[in-house]
Structure formats: C-alpha cells, structure tokens
Image (cartoon, rainbow, N blue to C red):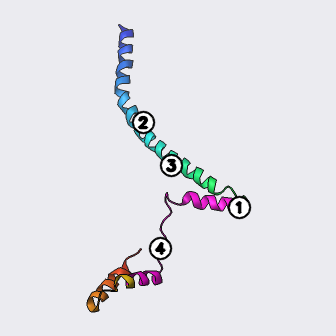
C-alpha cells in the first residue's frame, strides 16, 4: 500500500509540474529567436570588418553591433529641412504658406 502511495504522489507531482515547465519553455524559445538575430548581426558585422585589424576592428565591431537592425535614416539638418519645406510650399501663398512652413520646420525628421 505504501509503494502505491509513493507512485501516485510521483505521478500527480509530474502532472501538476508539467504546466510550470511548459510556461518556462515559451520564453526560452522567444529568446532563442533573439539569439539567432544577434548571431545574424554578428555574422554580418564580422563580414564587413574582414579588412580591419586591432583597435580599428574593435571600434567598428562595437559600433556595428550596437546599431539597430537597419541603418537609421540620418536626421536632416535645419538647412536641408528648410530647403525641403520650401520646395513643398512652392504653391502656397501668405498665411497658408506661413502656417505650412511652421509645421513643416517643427517636425523632427
């Protein structure tokens, strides 16, 4: 009778523990995808740094690996933004143009 109780306890323990293990497996799978992404980035940066050596390579790899997935678009300077807004506002006159230029120049792009 005692052995049956022990076996029953082990089986019930396994049944109740299974959901806990299933919940911990999902985050591990998600981090696995992120790890593959990091590995991909490392491979790409390594290929680009093939001709670099020493401190130059180290600095490049640091910059390359810290950058986000796609190269971020460079911000427009104030002068470039003014030129772009002027081109877009070519057909506007008076208060319309003034209002458009104000909103166009204030956007951060």
Q: State how far apart marks 4 and 2 are (Cα).
A: 41 Å
Residue 45 spot, x, y in % from top left: 60, 55
Label 4 or label 3, whichever comes before in sequence order: 3
User: How far apart are the alpha carbons under marks 4 and 3?
Assistant: 26 Å
Q: Gap between marks 1 and 3, in whole Å?
A: 25 Å
The image shows residue 9, relative to residue 17, as above or below, that is above
Image quadrant in which you'd find residue 101: bottom left
Is 33 included in the stretch rendered in magenta?
Answer: no
The magenta stretch is 56-85
Residue 54, position in %: x, y?
Answer: 72, 59
Task: Label 3: state its secondary structure.
Answer: helix
Image marks 4 and 2: residues in contact by CB distance under 8 Å: no
Which residue lies under the disc numbered 2?
A: 25
Helix, strand or loop for the magenta stretch, by majority: helix
| Residue 75: assigned label | 4
Task: Examine the structure image and report whether residue 83 is included in the region drawn in magenta.
Answer: yes
Disc on the earlier residue, 1 or 3: 3
Q: Which residue sits at x=40%, y=75%?
A: 108
Q: How far, Cα to Cα, is label 2 from label 1?
A: 40 Å
Q: Which mark is residue 37?
A: 3
Considering only order in the chain, which callout, 4 or 1, is on the residue closer to the N terminus? 1
Task: Give the label on residue 55, or none.
Answer: 1
- SS for dot 4: loop
- Quadrant of res 4: top left
The residue that appears at 37% across and 19% down in the rendered structure is 11
Of the image marks 2 and 1, the number of the one nearer the N terminus: 2
């Amino acid at each position: 009778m005692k052995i049956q109780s022990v076996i029953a306890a082990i089986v019930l323990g396994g049944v109740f523990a299974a959901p806990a293990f299933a919940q911990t497996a999902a985050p591990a799978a998600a981090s696995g995808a992120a790890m593959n992404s990091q590995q991909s980035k490392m491979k790409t940066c390594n290929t680009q740094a093939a001709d670099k050596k020493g401190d130059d390579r180290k600095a490049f790899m640091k910059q390359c690996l810290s950058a986000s997935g796609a190269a971020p678009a460079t911000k427009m300077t104030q002068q470039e933004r003014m030129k772009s807004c002027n081109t877009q506002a070519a057909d506007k006159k008076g208060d319309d143009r003034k209002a458009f230029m104000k909103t166009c120049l204030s956007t951060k792009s």
